[in-house]
Amino acid sequence: MRVAIYGRVSTKKQDEMNQILQLREFVGTQAGWTLEKEYIDRMSGAGKKERPQFQRMLTDASRRKFDLLLFWSLDRLSREGIVKTIAYLDQLRGWGVGWRSYTQPFLDTGNEIVNSIVLSVLAAVAKQERVTISERTRAGLQRALKAGHRLGRRPVRVDLLQARKLRAQGLGLRPVAGKLRISVNTLRNALAEA
């Protein structure tokens, strides 16, 4: 059986090799399994950003480049909620590609009855975890604002006197911005606000 591995980490502090090494080892212990391909994304699984390796995996699955997709756990595959997660798994099954969760061995294409119930619960939990992380982040930002911290980039100081002088000499926005070493948009905004 040709097996593909999908791994995902959501922060730069995480190391995807924690998942990948164990998945590789597991494939090696299964009689008749050969590791065909690995797909690894280093970004959130919330669906707000394109996951290029995930998309490549789906394309390869549709072309039957492997027979089984092995992933660490359901939340490593997707945190997009019940409907989307089940749709991905059904899509794989429709292409004749099985799937299996390493840490949740009961999540396997061969276990139909358990899958329908458990998948719904686990997908809902994964989505709720994403919502909780988002709420914590917003709370942290609010706390930082209340403590007087400035969020975002540092403001760029624009020498408006010099900018006006250069503009009076007949220079356009782009040359003036170049001389002041700022972007054209920053210059345009500063002149409009002044």
Image (cartoon, helix red, strand yellow):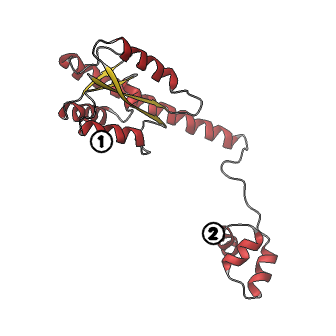
Q: Is residue 144 left or right of residue 93?
A: right
Q: Amino acid at mark 2?
A: Asn
Task: Give the x, y percent position of residue 51.
Answer: 42, 41
Q: Residues within 10 Å of mark 2 (few under 14, many from 20)?
A: few
Rounded to the nearest angstrom, the CA distance separating label 2 from label 1 is 40 Å
Q: Is residue 145 left or right of residue 22?
A: right
Q: Nearer the viewer, mark 2 or mark 1?
A: 1
Q: Secondary structure at mark 2?
A: helix
Task: Give the x, y percent position of residue 120.
Answer: 28, 25
**Residue 177 found in image quarter:** bottom right
Residue 185: assigned label? 2
Where, quadrant-wise, is the N terminus in this rendering? top left
**Residue 160 found in image quarter:** bottom right
N-term-proximal mark, 2 vs 1: 1
Look at mark 1 in the image and give the residue it sits on.
59
Q: Is residue 194 visible?
A: no
Where, quadrant-wise, is the C terminus in this rendering? bottom right
